[in-house]
Image (cartoon, rainbow, N blue to C red):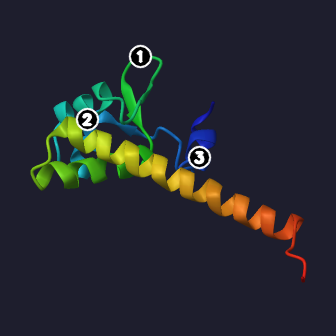
Amino acid sequence: MTAGDSFGRLDDDDYPAYTMGRAADMLGTTQGFLRAIGEARLITPLRSEGGHRRYSRYQLRIAARARELVDQGTPIEAACRIIILEDQLEEAQRINAEHRRTDGTANPPTAA
């Protein structure tokens, strides 16, 4: 991958563009916080060829949500679990909505 290829991917929410230090600075938190939410399996940073953690914008949004909860007094493990459950709920609601759309178009109600 060339520098030009990397530059073109900066708009990709899943591209691991940020080092741990930069990510911590952007979130106003510590690198230890990022390690802790990684250990809680909230996010799994990708690793550079040298083994350094790299974060995407999507992961930083999740980390920011965790930081909000922790700043409000929620223990970090509980904050991570809350975010995981919120994500699962959102996905279930999306699937249910898709099923309702599919059922509604595939089998329209008949008049009695």
The disc labelled 1 sits on which kind of residue? Gly
Quadrant of residue 33 in the image? Answer: top left
Q: Of label 2 and label 1, which has the lower sequence position? A: 2
Q: Nearer the viewer, mark 2 or mark 1?
A: 2
Quadrant showing the N terminus: top right
Q: Nearer the viewer, residue 85 or 10?
A: 85
Mark 1–mark 3 Cα distance, whole angstroms, equals 20 Å
Q: Residue 50: give its label.
A: 1
Tag 2–tag 1 contact (CB < 8 Å): no
Q: Position of residue 79 (x, y in %)?
A: 24, 44
Q: Secondary structure at mark 1?
A: loop
Q: Of label 2 and label 3, which has the lower sequence position? A: 3
Task: Rate crowding at label 3 as few (under 14), some (14 to 19) or many (20 or more) other CA atoms within 10 Å.
Answer: few
Quadrant showing the C terminus: bottom right
Instruction: Answer left or right for 93 relative to 101.
Output: left
The disc labelled 3 sits on which kind of residue? Arg
Please name the residue shown 45% across and 43% down the image. Answer: 56
Q: Position of residue 74 (x, y in %)?
A: 14, 47
Q: Residue 9: give its label.
A: 3
Instruction: Answer left or right for 38 relative to 112.
Output: left
- Total labels: the figure holds 3
Mark 2–mark 1 Cα distance, whole angstroms, equals 18 Å
**Residue extending furthest toward the top:** 50
Q: Residue 77: give its label.
A: none
Q: Is residue 28 visible?
A: no
Task: Rate crowding at label 1 as few (under 14), some (14 to 19) or many (20 or more) other CA atoms within 10 Å.
Answer: few
Instruction: Answer left or right for 89 relative to 24.
Output: right
The disc labelled 2 sits on which kind of residue? Leu
Q: Is residue 99 visible?
A: yes
Q: Nearer the viewer, residue 83 or 26?
A: 83
Query: Residue tagged by mark 2?
Result: 34
Q: Nearer the viewer, residue 26 or 37?
A: 37
